[in-house]
Image (tube, helix red, strand yellow):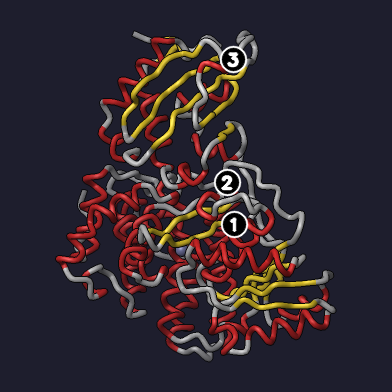
């Protein structure tokens, strides 16, 4: 028994105009400061105004939304009493909007206690619209929420199937100007979602096809979108790929690269996509070394020919590394400029946080503590995983 | 020797497994909160079984079959029917997937749960290492 959850998705050029058709009285737009600077908030407000919806804006979500920001936002929502909440931006504002919505409806909840293991009863006061302005996190179509506890320097994966948008707008107009570094980081996040979602122990028939398609789209269009930001087709395909990968992993699970990536990102403030994609090939090697060859299906689907599953898997791992190199992304922790001494001092905490990250539970191969330490060591030095 | 699921011997075997598991000690080192694992009546089982476990920082300090629900007031209560527990304990059903699909129910401080998910997995792994006999 399992579920498949998805918002209604409006995608492609002009998707934003669908907002003019929705019905409601008040919408609270949750965004980050750049959304205002880029004029994106105004574009959204204009559409909502056409629908006679009164709007308010909170555009102060930080890059790694904290528990405090979520509580603050929820208090603003309670003042305005919106019937729509609009999460606009990359993963951070969208995830913050999900958590604020949960606390708006359920003031008794703690943001780090939003859990898929209990019924929350959301949707009585408001519903959620998500509009993604990067092509990576898939946050627009997922119910997962990543928050940061600044005291513990820890990222927390929370969320409930109820913290899912009613409507997700996947409109490429918002990603045409993404700088190359952000394009690469977010695109590699989407790749990591698709590969991990496919290989996770919780993989299933409904999510598999989405993961396969997303991997194919990323390999075909991310290099183009990175090399030439004006390539409208590549931009649109990558925007779709991110949402497809998001649906793929949220209905299966992300795994070890995300658990380790969250730990590293929480400790050293490295962008999410860079972190998780850095760990991806190492964790794939670790799984493959124990005979996990589901990756071979992905290799075949993108046309990597190999005589057997083991070699197909190795080919895919090599292709991931090549893509990361081609996009100028980091393939080791050391290359991020993190000193050996700082890494060594943080190593036990990194293991603690990765070990108890919600994303670890469905990993195709679960590392024990010693193996986890060695995985971090390999990723630090850029050495292949041989165990 | 196989022990009957839900029996005093079984819950003691689980305590032993947990207290000798380094993986559990690591995963649950921040865990605070005792548990009722409740086996709800089904089929030949006509009354619930209350398995009490005092879990504290990677150790199981006490474990026994409680005579009735009022014996303890634990911080967490996880419940499910005999057949669901059987599937979980014999590793046919992922415990977190069981919880997410409401086949098992959990009540308690969710913040503690969300920060210590691996501990839950290690408990189930410990269950699977017990040679368990099921009555139905
Ligand atoms: Zn991600």
**How far from the left and from the top, in percent, is residue A362?**
44, 45
Task: Residue A174: name its quadrant.
Answer: bottom right
List the residue tagged with mark 3.
B48
- Badge 1: residue crowd in 10 Å (few <14, some 14–19, many ≥20): many
- Name the residue rendered at 43%, 70% in the picture: A188
The answer to whether residue A121 of the structure is visible from this angle is: yes
Q: Quadrant of the N terminus of chain A?
A: top right
Share a chain, discs 3 and 2? no
Mark 1 on the same chain as mark 3: no
Q: Residue tagged by mark 1? A: A143
Q: Position of residue A325 (x, y in %)?
A: 31, 76
Of residues B57 and A211, the one nearer the viewer is: B57
Residue under mark 3: which chain is it in?
B
Q: Is residue B100 above or below residue A99?
A: above
Is ligand 1 closer than 8 angstroms to the Cβ of mark 2?
Answer: no
The picture places residue B57, in percent across and down from the top left corner, at 33, 35
Give me the chain letter of mark 1: A
Tell us which disc is closer to us: 1 or 3: 3
Measure the C-alpha gap from mark 3 to mark 2.
26 Å
Q: Which residue is mark 2?
A: A116
Contact check, label 3 and label 2, Cβ < 8 Å: no
Q: CA distance from mark 1 to mark 3?
A: 35 Å
- Please report, as a chain letter, where disc 2 is located: A
Q: Position of residue B40 (x, y in %)?
A: 60, 19
């Amino acid at each position: 028994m399992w579920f498949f959850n998805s918002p209604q998705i409006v995608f492609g050029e002009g998707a934003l105009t669908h907002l003019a058709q929705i019905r409601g009285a008040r919408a609270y737009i949750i965004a980050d400061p750049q959304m205002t600077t880029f004029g994106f908030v105004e574009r959204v407000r204009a559409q909502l105004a056409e629908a006679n919806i009164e709007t308010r804006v909170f555009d102060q979500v930080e890059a790694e939304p904290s528990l405090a920001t979520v509580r603050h936002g929820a208090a603003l929502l309670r003042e305005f009493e919106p019937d729509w909440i609009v999460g606009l931006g990359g993963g951070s504002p969208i995830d913050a909007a999900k958590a604020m919505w949960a606390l708006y409806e359920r003031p008794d909840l703690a943001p780090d206690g939003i859990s898929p293991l209990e019924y929350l009863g959301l949707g009585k006061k408001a519903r959620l619209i998500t509009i993604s302005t990067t092509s990576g996190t898939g946050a627009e179509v997922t119910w997962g929420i990543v928050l940061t506890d600044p005291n513990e320097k820890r990222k927390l994966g929370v969320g409930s199937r109820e913290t899912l948008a009613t409507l997700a707008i996947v409109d490429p107009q918002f990603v045409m100007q993404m700088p190359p570094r952000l394009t690469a980081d977010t695109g590699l996040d989407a790749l990591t979602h698709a590969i991990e979602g496919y290989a996770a122990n919780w993989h299933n028939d409904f999510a598999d096809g989405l993961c396969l398609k997303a991997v194919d789209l990323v390999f075909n269009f991310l290099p183009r979108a990175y090399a030439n930001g004006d390539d409208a087709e590549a931009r649109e395909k990558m925007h779709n790929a991110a949402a497809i990968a998001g649906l793929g992993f949220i209905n299966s699970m992300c795994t070890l690269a995300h658990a380790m990536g969250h730990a590293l990102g929480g400790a050293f403030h490295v962008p999410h996509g860079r972190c998780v994609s850095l760990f991806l090939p190492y964790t794939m090697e670790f799984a493959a070394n124990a005979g996990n060859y589901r990756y071979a299906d992905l290799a075949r689907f993108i046309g990597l020919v190999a005589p057997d599953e083991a070699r197909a898997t190795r080919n895919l791992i090599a292709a991931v590394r090549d893509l990361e190199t081609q996009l100028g992304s980091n393939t080791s922790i050391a290359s991020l400029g993190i000193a050996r001494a700082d890494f060594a001092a943080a190593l036990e905490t990194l293991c603690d946080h990765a070990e108890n990250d919600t994303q670890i539970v469905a990993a195709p191969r679960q590392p024990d503590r010693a193996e986890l330490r060695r995985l971090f060591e390999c990723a630090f030095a850029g050495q292949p995983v041989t165990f | 020797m196989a022990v009957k699921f839900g029996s005093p011997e079984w819950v003691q075997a689980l305590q032993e497994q947990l207290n000798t598991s380094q993986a559990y000690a690591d995963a649950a080192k921040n865990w605070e909160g005792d548990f009722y694992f409740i086996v709800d009546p089904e089929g030949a089982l006509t009354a619930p079984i209350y398995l009490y476990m005092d879990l504290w920082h990677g150790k199981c300090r006490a474990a026994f079959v409680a005579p009735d629900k009022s014996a303890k007031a634990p911080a967490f209560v996880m419940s499910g029917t005999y057949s669901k527990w059987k599937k979980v304990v014999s590793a046919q059903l992922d415990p977190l997937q069981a919880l997410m699909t409401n086949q098992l129910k959990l009540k308690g401080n969710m913040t503690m749960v969300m920060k210590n998910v691996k501990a839950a997995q290690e408990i189930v792994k410990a269950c699977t290492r017990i040679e368990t006999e099921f009555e139905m």
